[in-house]
Image (cartoon, rainbow, N blue to C red):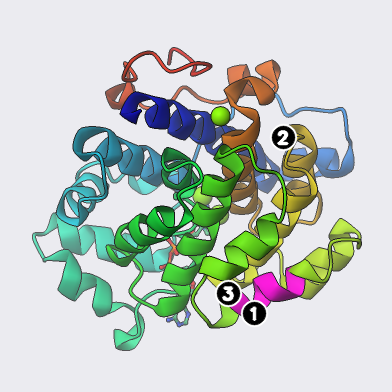
Amino acid sequence: ERSENIVSAFDSLVGLSVGDAFGAQFFATENRPLLREETALPAPPWPWTDDTEMACNLLDVLRRHGQVERDALAAAFAERYDPYRGYGPGTVVLLRALRDGEPWRSATTAQFGGRGSMGNGAAMRVAPLGAYYPGDLERAALEATASAVVTHAHPEGVAGAVAVAVAASRAASGDTSGLVDAVLAHTPPGRVHDGVRRAAGLLDRTREEAAYELGNGARVLAQDTVPFCVWVAARHLGDYERAVRDCVAVGGDIDTTAAITGGIVAAHVGAEGVPRAWRDAREPLPGWLSPATGEPRGVDRD
Ligand code: 8NA
Ligand code: MG
Ligand code: MG
Ligand code: MG
């Protein structure tokens, strides 16, 4: 069943990486007019960003160890750090310190005056991990916590990762009911939890109203990013393109909201649910991640 789990995780990674690459296209000034056009696609290739680089590292650790090994994850993040992938400012400082040999525990807890990061960076990479444990929400939450603390020591940074992993675990299980409630039940108390609770009350509202109430990631914090992503995924769990376009349409941290939401939805619809043209437009995944174990269904031969 371990190989089944890795298939599910790779499905989610396809959705995450395509969402990341698609969303990042709209940071380009020349592509802004396309933002609200439902049919137009940016010209390929669509390079992926830090969201995908970190997700690939996390999936590689899962594949090698069968669970999150924090030392291995920190080493992978540091060794494969590419400064041109658009990492958050705190994460740049952190990954440089890890490269210089500082232990991840001290480096990570020292971030932001000793409070740790509550950026959305632990959440943006974690959907495939949730998909690796389909329907086992407790385990998804536990492993997500382990994966988050390597870079995000603040409880809100961790809670964001837990919420996304639980959503992806639930989505991968095939159970389409009560996604928001399932996330709420496993997310520790705090601002991310409060946001997800508000999302539950907004399910009949428009994407613009939900983004206004919950945040669109413009502050790059877990709490103003994750609740909206859970809201979109709950609304469009069966429709990858609709979900990702809704993330892009409201602006904000669109590579990351599209990566998170795309990763959750693809855990449910599979890589085949991601439009072929979008998969072809996305920059190939890093060579060191291939060949994928057991040639997972639907994964691009990148
Ligand atoms: P991070 O750890 O630097 O956190 C992101 C930001 O959140 C920080 O730079 C701070 O502004 C703020 N922040 C985090 N923790 C605290 C705190 N305790 N107190 C006050 N402020 C805080 O990086 P990250 O890895 O969490 O960030 C992920 C984001 O960075 C994603 O959106 C990712 O795509 C990337 N990013 C890229 C671009 C780009 O232009 N390519 C733009 C924004 C973000
Ligand atoms: Mg990014
Ligand atoms: Mg981003
Ligand atoms: Mg599946």
Q: Quadrant of residue 39?
A: top right
Q: Which residues are magenta?
A: 192-199
- The amino acid beneath tag 3 is Val
Q: Disc 2 to disc 1, how far (Cα)? A: 26 Å
Q: Main secondary structure of the magenta part?
A: helix
Kind of residue at disc 1: Asp
**Residue 231 place in picture, x, y as percent:** 73, 58
Residue 293 in picture, x, y percent from top left: 31, 20
The kind of secondary structure element at disc 1 is helix
Q: Is residue 106 left or right of residue 157?
A: left
Which part of the image, by quadrant, shows the C terminus? top left
Numbered label attached to residue 259: none
The reply to whether residue 289 is in sight is: yes
Q: Does residue 274 lie above or below 300 as drawn?
A: below
Q: Around disc 3, counting alpha carbons within 10 Å, would you say few (fewer than 14), some (14 to 19), or many (20 or more)?
A: many
Q: Verify CB contact (< 8 Å) between mark 3 and mark 1.
A: yes
Residue drawn 57% across the image and 25% down it? 282
What's the distance in space between the residues labelled 3 and 2, CA to CA? 24 Å
In this picture, residue 24 sits left or right of residue 61: right
> Three-letter amino acid code at disc 2?
Tyr
Q: Is the CB of the residue bearing disc 1 within 8 angstroms of ligand 1?
A: no
Residue 192's disc number = 3
Q: Are marks 2 and 1 in contact (CB under 8 Å)?
A: no
| Residue picked out by circle 1 | 194
The answer to which of 59 and 204 lies nearer the viewer is 204
Q: Is residue 215 above or below residue 31?
A: below
Residue 120 belongs to magenta span:
no
Asked if residue 20 can be seen in this view, the reply is no
Residue 56 coordinates in the image, percent (x, y): 37, 37
Provide the secondary structure element on which disc 3 rests: helix
Check contact, mark 3 vs mark 2: CB within 8 A: no
| Mark 3–mark 1 distance (CA, rounded to whole Å) | 5 Å
